[in-house]
Image (spheres, rainbow, N blue to C red):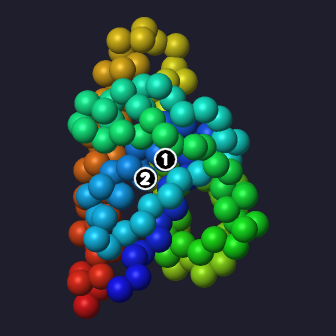
Amino acid sequence: MEKIKVLFVCDDNSLRSPIAEAWLNYLGQEDFLARSAGFEPGSLNPLAVAVMQEVGLDISGHKTRSVFALYTAGELFAYVITLCDPAVAERCPIFPGVARVANWPFPDPTREEIPEDEKLRRVRELRDLLRERVEKFIQMARPESQG
């Protein structure tokens, strides 16, 4: 059976979307294939790498990519999930063949003017919230739950 392709999108593909991609590829590996992209790809955030290493997942090799490059390449996804502010998410192109689009608005704590130890604590919190959301998504979207 072919895996269900899911695209996670955030502003710069540096924190939220790579974490969500890693969780879905790890937790739903039999049924799903996740990718991630950003509106303006930046560099992978070192805090994303650190907090995922704490749970045994290595995302240090993640290469940020542009959502528009995936779109123009004709990539097909069953789901496109934006992880940013809904107003920013509206910039996402409409992918051909997309069955469903969703917005999971998670803030990026690394963009706030807070101490580094607080940023790390909040990125850990984000990691755990994304895992919970991905677990719920798997239960909802897994082929056997589709009847």
Please provide percent x and percent y for residue 35.
50, 58
* Disc 1 element: helix
Res 28 visible: yes
Q: Do the CB atoms of the residues marked 2 and 1 lie less than 8 Å apart?
A: yes
Q: Which residue is found at the position 59% from the left and 51% from the top?
A: 37
Location of the C terminus (image quadrant): bottom left
Please provide percent x and percent y for residue 22.
38, 49
**Vertical position of residue 46 compared to residue 118: above or below:** below
Residue 98, image quadrant = bottom right
Q: On the image, numbered disc 1 is attached to which residue?
A: 17
Location of the N terminus (image quadrant): bottom left
Q: On the image, numbered disc 2 is attached to which residue?
A: 21
Res 16 visible: no
Asked whether 17 or 49 is in front, the reply is 49
Residue 73, image quadrant = bottom right
Please provide percent x and percent y for residue 43.
60, 32
Q: Residues within 10 Å of mark 1 (few under 14, many from 20)?
A: many
Q: Which residue is found at the position 31% from the left and 33% from the top?
A: 53
